[in-house]
Image (spheres, rainbow, N blue to C red):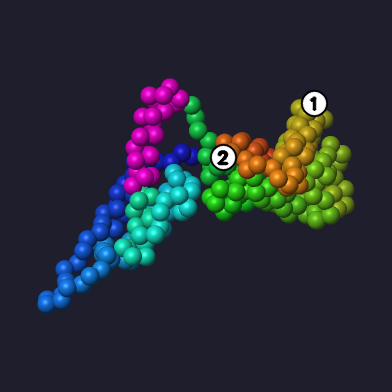
Amino acid sequence: MTLDIDWARGELARFLELTELYRPPDPPGVMVLSSSLSNRGSQSDIIASAHVVEKILDRVLPHWKTEVPSKRNENVNRWCQHREAAQRADAALQRDAEIRERLGDNAPQLSAATMHPWVWQGARALWQSGHFREAVTAAARKVNAETQNKVERRDLSETKLFQNAFSLTPPKDGEHRLRLMEDDGGDTFRSIHRGAMAFAEGCYAGIRNPNSHEDGLPELSEHEALEQLAAFSVLARWVDKSAVSQPS
C-alpha cells in the first residue's frame, strides 16, 4: 500500500491552517512584551489533527523529531516544530513524483512501513531514531518470538528453530511443523521447505548475528538496513501464512 499523496497533503494543509500563528492584541492600556504567539484553531482541533499529521511525518520525514529544530516551541509556540516539519513534508510530497520523473528514476519504492507487521513493529522505534542496525536486530527478535509462539517452542531459537519448524520430517509430540503447502510427496513441497530453512539460516547467520555480536561495526546506511528488513519481512510472511502441522 502506497501513501495517498493528495490525502496526506490535505491533512498537512489542514494542520497548518489550524496552527497558523498570530499575535493576539494586547489588553486595553497594557503592553505585553513577549515572543509568544497564538494559534488560529482550538487546541482540541489541533491535537486531533496532530495525531494524524505525526503519522504522515513519520512516513515522509522519518527523522523529523531530531532534524527539525524544536527550540522555538518553548518561547514562541508549542507547535513550531510540527509546523516546520509539516511544511517540509508537504514540499517533499509535492516534488517527489516530479523529481523522480525528471531524474529518470521512476522505479517502485519500498517502505519499511508496508513490510510485514512483525518486522516493522519490532524495528519502528529504533528506526525512527536512526539506529538502523539495532532496528534490524529488533525485527529479527520479533520474527523469532512470533515463530516460537506459532509452533509453541521456547527451547529453540533462530536457525535451529526454523530448521525444526520447516523440517521435512513429520511432526511429533512437542515438535510442530510449519507447512507452506500440503505434503503431496512432490519435489515442490520439498523444495519450498528446504528453501525456507536455508533462507532463515541466511537471515540469522548472515544478518542478525553480525549485527548483534560484532562490536565497532559502522552504522548501516538506511538503504542497506531497508534491504535487510525486507529479508526478514519475507521470512515473516512465510511463517505467518504457514499452517501448523501437528502429530495425528
Q: Categorize mark 1 by other alpha carbons within 10 Å: few (<14), some (14-19), many (20+).
A: few
Q: Which mark is residue 62?
A: none
> As drawn, is 95 to the left or to the right of 121?
left
**Label 2 close to label 1 by CB (< 8 Å):** no
Give the residue at x 39% y 29%: 99
> As drawn, is 189 to the left or to the right of 106?
right
Of the numbered discs 2 and 1, the one sitting upstream in the chain is 1
- Which secondary structure class fits the magenta region best? helix
User: What x and y, as percent, mark residue 233?
Assistant: 63, 41
Q: CA distance from mark 2 to mark 1?
A: 38 Å
Between marks 2 and 1 in the image, the one whose residue lies nearer the viewer = 2
Query: From where the camera sits, is residue 113 visible?
Result: yes
> As drawn, is 17 to the left or to the right of 243?
left
Among the 4 quarters of the image, the one containing residue 187: top right
Q: Which residues are magenta?
A: 87-106
Please name the amino acid that badge 1 sits on: Asp
Between 128 and 27, the residue placed more toward the observer is 27
Q: Secondary structure at mark 1?
A: helix
Between 181 and 212, the residue placed more toward the observer is 212
Among the 4 quarters of the image, the one containing residue 72: bottom left
User: What x and y, as percent, mark residue 88?
Assistant: 36, 45
Give the residue at x 37% y 55%: 82
Mark 1 = which residue? 187
Q: Categorize mark 2 by other alpha carbons within 10 Å: few (<14), some (14-19), many (20+).
A: some
Please name the amino acid that badge 2 sits on: Glu
Give the residue at x 32% y 63%: 77
Q: Which mark is residue 222?
A: 2
